[in-house]
Image (spheres, helix red, strand yellow):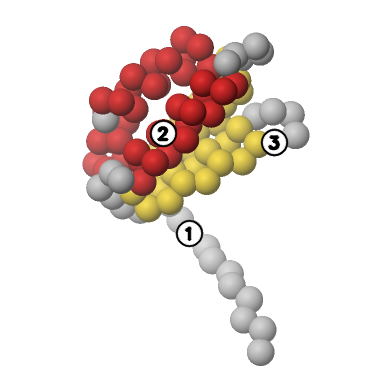
Amino acid sequence: MFLVVFRNRKRAGMDAAAYAADAARMEALARAQPGYLAFKSYTADDGEVVALSEWADEASARAWGRQFEHAQVQQRGRAEYYADYTLFACANPRVHRYERHDP
């Protein structure tokens, strides 16, 4: 598995409707990409967003980063949506699981 963590803060006054439309389109497009496993996004009380995407391997995650429409929206994000962001990428993260099984 390859994990991508995208932490970001939006610009004040950005076009929220345009962002929501782009985000929905990117999520649908990502789901159709080879190697896509999962995506979730969480917003903290202070407005920071943490988005997690899981990919089968690094090549799949990198291919998504270079996908034409995604690359265009990345540029729009830097120009119009984000005040700042940090992207973390990790191959084969150490995973611990717990699952309760009640009788």
Q: Along the horizontal axis of the image, is 9 left or right of 51?
A: right
Residue furthest bottom as drawn: 103
Which residue position is annotated with label 2? 25
Q: Amino acid at mark 3?
A: Ala
Q: Contact (CB < 8 A) between labels 1 and 2?
A: no
Q: Is residue 32 above or below residue 88?
A: below
Q: Which circle's residue, 1 or 3, is located before the other in the chain?
A: 3
Relative to 81, residue 53 above or below: below
Q: Residues within 10 Å of mark 2 (few under 14, many from 20)?
A: some
Secondary element type, mark 3: loop
Residue picked out by circle 3: 44
Check whether the beta carbons of the residues at disc 2 and disc 3 lie within 8 A of each other: no
Mark 1 surroundings: few (<14), some (14-19) or many (≥20) residues within 10 A: few
Q: Is residue 41 left or right of residue 1?
A: right
Q: Residue 100: image x %, image y %?
A: 63, 76
Tell me the kind of residue under disc 2. Arg
